Amino acid sequence: MVLEIRALTLEFEGLRALEGVSLTVAPGALHALVGPNGAGKTSLLNCVGGFYAPTGGRVSFGGAPIHGLRPHRVAAHGIARTFQFVELFRHMTVLDNILLGRHRHMRAGVAAGALFWGRSRREEALHRRRVEEIIEFLELERHRKEPIATLPFGVQKLVGIGRALALEPALLLLDEPSTGMNREEKENLARFLLRIKHELGVTMLWVEHDMELVGDLADAVSVLDFGQKIAEGPAAAVLRDPRVAEAYLGRAFVRERGAE
Amino acid sequence: MDTRLRRVAVAALVVALLLLPRFGSSFVLDLAAQTALAAVGALALNLLTGLAGQISLGHAGFLATGAFTTAALVESGWRSPLVTLPAAALVGALLGVIVGIPSLRLKGLYLALGTLAMHHVVLYGAGELQTRWGVNTGYTIPPPRLGALVLKGTVPWYYALVAVAAAALVLAVNLQRSRAGWMAIRDREIAAESVGIDVARYKILAFVWSSAATSVAGALFAYYRGFVSVEAFSFFLAIEYVAMIVIGGLGSALGAVLGAGFVTLLPHGIDAAVGAVRLPGGVEYYLFPAKFGAFGLLMALFLIFEPQGLVGIWRRVRNWVFLWPFRHRPLRAAS
């Protein structure tokens, strides 16, 4: 299913966070979204995820409009997200956090849950099996029963991805998954991203600051600067684009380097 | 292994509770019944505050709702508990919706104030009801009757209330296991939304189930006391329930029950302590305020030294017994 963003605008009291951004994420693609701090990358993810209501433009996923929906309705469309600062349930274990990601697939009501009978009981075994598969997939076995608060940040970020995968999403929104990871963890992350793409077939819109990762992994890259899209295309071409260098480094620096 | 031990412990507890009337005086049975009744209310409040994270100072109001629904129905001739208890649950649930809606906007202290307002509105309404029916002191409630069965006397009431509390405990434990969504809302609302939890619906649901259960507890209270009046549902009662779940250990069903026992028995404990010491005359005069003071002091001490409450102490003691003579579990525990 294709994610289409058309002329998306987001304004906060006169401040334009996004100005007419259009973006198409092809099905099955690992689509990176880069740009300097404050370019509007997270704002764009929040618009897609339903955390912000865009002031203009449209977002559709698989043909269904999703802009302006509440986050839980967006999740119901098969869109999951991770957060820059993980936003996990800190007092719960890794397993329970990922289990919560199964919420969308749980059908038993409160009464059935209170009696723990019938559907509620059958469901629990099924969901726990799925969670174990995700734990295995992300190699989190040794942390299974540990509370989130005790884990290193890099592992917490993986748990965040695990929780999002538990939704069995068609589209995964990743907000800087590599931040706070050391080199080894980043290499693992790269491996997981590729496995998610190839084995699970999940489409990903991926906000990232690490250009090396983006250059190695992304199928397509879109660049935002001051709320506008300034470049788009395959990673190799986009990262060489002088406008992109200018957005990151400033005009003076680029001119200076060009003169060398 | 753990499960088997737990089963043995539960079985032992059930036997002890069943045999208590053979050994306990009617005073002890009355205290146990009161504890059981308080446990139902505390479990309901724990669902709302401990699990879903919605602070409520209106618990006495919800109890009053059940008690006065029962009183009004009994006065009107609907005496069967088959009518009054479901009616109490229904009215409680309805009030839960009304109070729950502001919770979508209000958080923390502001929500506490909102529920406090509800408490005063309910008590005002109950007071009006009392004067309208011309019973200034309160309603007398006859014992509940089902056909030829009449629930009367200390021992039958003890069994009935303990059974109700046990059922409430089982439901609460299961809910905690199967509906983690509530805890998710308490911990991180944004993250809860992102995994597809309808936060608004879940908050309202927490209020509805909690207040329905509390209202039923209020109805049982009315039957058990045989008398309903506004004075029984003071703001202090609401504080007592908050104390139960805090002292017991927020978010734990077992904690709610332990806390209910602690708070119910504390005043009697202080009485007994003072009685045993036999201080010179005049001390009894200060006893009443001393109880309030002890209450506040204990709550503060628990918050400072044992934030996990009685259930935290229980877990530590249990682990100490299990691991003795070691201090820690071996690194690779055989499970």
Image (tube, coloured by chain):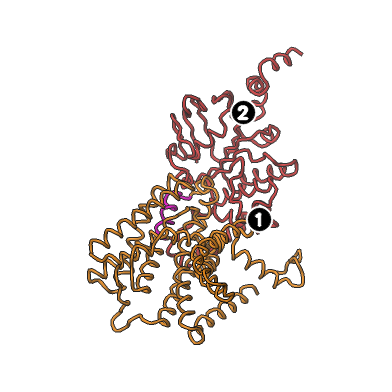
Chain colours: A red, B orange
* Lower position in the chain sequence, tag 2 or tag 1: 2
Q: Chain of mark 2?
A: A
Q: Chain of mark 1?
A: A
Q: Residue at x 77, y 69 (%)?
A: B326
Which residue is at the front of the view, A39 or B282? B282
The answer to whether residue B316 is seen in the rendering is: yes
Q: Quadrant of the C terminus of chain B?
A: bottom right
Picture coordinates of residue A79, whole percent (x, y): 51, 44
Q: Which residue is mark 2?
A: A35
Q: Residue at x 58, y 27 (%)?
A: A224
View extreme (front): residue: B281
Give the CA distance from mark 2 to mark 1: 33 Å
Picture coordinates of residue B208, whole percent (x, y): 39, 58
Which residue is at the front of the view, A179 or B92? B92
Residue A136: which numbered mark, if any? 1
Q: Which residues are magenta?
A: B197-209
Residue flagged by tag 1: what amino acid is it? Answer: Glu
Q: Residue at x 57, y 75 (%)?
A: B278
The answer to whether residue A127 is seen in the rendering is: no
Q: Quadrant of residue B139?
A: bottom left
SS at circle 1? helix
